[in-house]
Image (cartoon, helix red, strand yellow):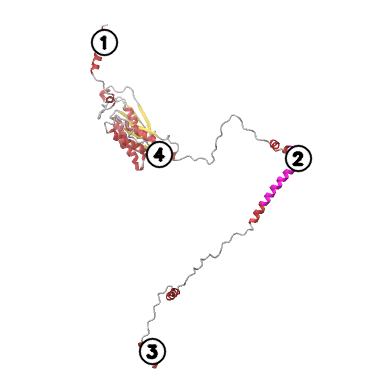
Amino acid sequence: MASVNAMDGVSETQTGTGSDKKPADEADLLTVPDGWKEAPFTKEDNPRGMLEESSFATLFPKYREAYLKDCWPLVEKALGEMYVKASLDLIEGSMTVCTTKKTFDPYIIIRARDLIKLLARSVPFEQAVRILQDDVACDIIKIGTLVRNRERFVKRRQRLIGPKGSTLKALELLTNCYVMVQGNTVSALGPFNGLKEVRKVVMDTMKNIHPIYNIKTLMIKRELSKDPELRVQNWERFLPKFRHKNLTKRKEPRKKSVKKEYTPFPPQQPDSQVDKELASGEFFLRESVKKRAKMAEIKVKQAEALTKKQEQRKKAFIPPKEKPLLKKTKAPVEGKLDIEAIKAKVKKAKTKKLGAPPVSPAPPVTSSTNKKKKTKGKS
């Protein structure tokens, strides 16, 4: 009984102290204060170390062998600070990481596994070593099976990179992530929120949505997050809405078959030759009369065919229409002729010669020249 009373007293004191304090706002509890960082995991948190050994291995392509051989001492040094052992097997083409007795962080083996995965996917060591930090994560997105056609896959992958890597660089600046497009995978390294946006952009690009639309949305979100008043509000009214326009229309057939209405009853049977003769009354005629009627029809058809053949033969003997050789000239307009003008034209034509300079008039004969001629004649 005493223990029960004691418990009642404790509960009363607890409830009393709780009633004095004001309830905390949910928005304050959900939001992380600016500049807050989680305390790093140190050796004091786990002084006894690990009980069991954990290891991970991954294969790497042949073209990465030379680079990994050069940078492997740096990998061993970075993992040695966390008491993780790393080994490189060039014969099998594999990398292995495993914990030791001195390893105190239980999650460091997962980060070491991600490190060797990034190195195998052509991520440089300077960027891949950042995965050992607490606030950095990685995401390897497989895009090889998202598009069946190989040419279409290459075009969309190039669209993600952009001209001279401009689209990829803009995505890295907006998400604070390092993005590497290699083969059939996209490797991303950075904070958790940025990795989420990178995956969305990559998947939308493979679904034939241009990355510039998502980049524009990210730019607007970045500006809105700077305003403390707009952090709590809904941003749908600020974000652009892009409609998917299907410009390529399916080719429709020229002859469209119209489906008839379904009826449970079968169609009516066509009339036989006997039914037609009964309807016209030919069935009751004699055979001689039927033969005469048939012969008359045949003769009419033969006459029509003969006239058509004769018309075709006559077409060859019809002369074609000839065009007139001389063109019709307009009759001269009756009126008074200007004789003086015609004379001037003729005189002008005489003075001019084709390709020669105009003829200058002869100089007038003087009296001195006449006297010279007379003296010559006397002598």
Task: State the mark number for residue 373.
Answer: 3
Crowding around mark 2 (Cα neighbors within 10 Å: few <14, some 14 to 19, many 20+) is few
Lateral position of residue 246 relative to residue 257, left or right: left
**Relative height, residue 319 to residue 79 (above, below):** below
> What residue do we see at 37% from left, 30% from top?
57
Image position, residue 8 (x, y; %): 26, 10
- Look at the image and tell me in which quarter the N terminus lies: top left
Task: State the mark number for residue 8.
Answer: 1
- Mark pair 3, 1: CA separation: 171 Å
Closer to us: 295 or 127: 295
Total number of numbered discs in the rendering: 4
**The quarter of the displayed image where residue 102 is located:** top left
- Mark pair 4, 1: CA separation: 68 Å
Of the two numbered discs 1 and 2 in the rendering, the one whose residue sits closer to the viewer: 2
- Look at the image and tell me in which quarter the C terminus lies: bottom left
Of the two numbered discs 3 and 2 in the rendering, the one whose residue sits closer to the viewer: 2
Q: Are marks 1 and 2 in contact (CB under 8 Å)?
A: no
Mark 2 — residue? 287
Q: Secondary structure at mark 1?
A: helix
Quick one: label 4 or label 1, which is nearer the N terminus? 1
**Relative height, residue 104 to residue 238 (above, below):** above
